[in-house]
Every structure is written in C-alpha cells, then in structure tokens.
Image (cartoon, rainbow, N blue to C red):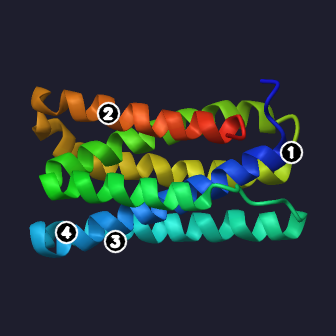
Amino acid sequence: MKWMTSEKLLAINHAGEWGAIHFYTAQSTVSTFRFPNEKTAIESILGHEKVHFKLFDDLLIKRKTRRCHALWFWQIGGYLLGFMTALIGIKAAMVATEVFEDVVISHFDQQLEWLKTNDNELHDLVSYVYQDELSHGVIACPYTEAAGIIYTPLRFIVRILTETMMFLAKHGI
C-alpha cells in the first residue's frame, strides 16, 4: 500500500494504543459501579495496552519520529466509546472490545505483510503486540457469544468508528 511508511505505521500504532488506553480506562471506571466482578478482565487488557503504548513510544523516541498530531482525538474518542458501551453493560463493553480488537488485528495483518520486507524491528514489535490483541478478543468472546443479535447495531457502530479513526490516521487527517 503506497501510504505505508515505517514512520507512519509507528505513529498510527502509537496513537491507536493511546486511544485503547483511554477506551479501557473508561470501561474500567464504569465497571467499578456497573459490573465490579468483571473489572479484573478489563484491567488485564488495560495493562497490555499500557505496555504496548510504552513500546511504541520508546521506538518513536529512538527513531525521532513525530507523534500523531491528533492524539487528543484518539484519547477523547477512545474514552467516549469505552464509557458509553460500558454504561450499557458488560455485554456491550465486551462486544465493543471484540469489534475494536478485530479492527486492530485486521490493521496489523496489513502492516505485518508490508513490514516483513521493509522494517524488521517494527515487524517484531507489531508481531508481539498482535498476539496480545488476539488474546483480548478471547477474553471478550464468552460475553459476545451471549450478547446475541440485539447487539448487531452496536457492532456496526463500533466498527465504523474504529475504521474511521484508522482511515483518518492513515491519510494524515
């Protein structure tokens, strides 16, 4: 894909992890009073996202690559999406998690194909993060299987919002 450069992929992944931190922070906050027994699972995912962000941040600094100018947008968007879905309940929160992570995995699949011949260091980092992202979908799976068809509109909305953020980041908007 002609828009791909290592610098752009690094900045996009960094921003995406920033958004994910705020997505799961919001879910964790709401879980305290809405579904406290599920907070541990959300906190586990949040811990992974913080590690991912730090890894991408360290590489950005090492390579002197500029950060995404719209980090604030990722922060607000991630927090609002996490907050609103968690307010609905644990099933909605996990449906959002499943879809959010599915979009991320698809994004990483595209990256890994390009990175394997263009940037070994970033390829290895994305491969590592990819495995954690797959595990987040596994954590969400028992809830999403129980969610049923009623959550189809939510799945669609979360997918469109997440893919829109990716599109905007890829095209520097």
Task: Identify which residue is drawn at 86% across, 69% down.
Answer: 62
Q: How many marks?
A: 4
Of residues 23 and 124, the one nearer the viewer is 23
Earlier-in-chain disc, 3 versus 2: 3
Q: Which residue is mark 4?
A: 31
Q: Is residue 7 above or below residue 157?
A: below
Q: Which residue is mark 1?
A: 119
> Alpha-carbon neighbours of circle 1 within 10 Å: few (<14), some, or many (≥20)?
few
Earlier-in-chain disc, 1 versus 4: 4
- Between the C-alphas of marks 3 and 1, the distance is 32 Å
The quadrant in which residue 8 appears is top right
Q: Which residue is mark 2?
A: 157
> Alpha-carbon neighbours of circle 3 within 10 Å: few (<14), some, or many (≥20)?
some
| Residue 126, horizontal then vertical, whole percent | 67, 50
What's under tag 1, amino acid-wise?
Answer: Asp
Location of the C terminus by quadrant is top right
Of residues 24 and 80, the one nearer the viewer is 80
| Residue 149, horizontal then vertical, whole percent | 12, 26
What's under tag 4, amino acid-wise?
Answer: Ser
Instruction: Indicate which disc residue 77 carries.
Output: none
Q: Which residue is mark 3?
A: 43
Give the mark toward the camera: 3 or 2: 2
Earlier-in-chain disc, 4 versus 2: 4
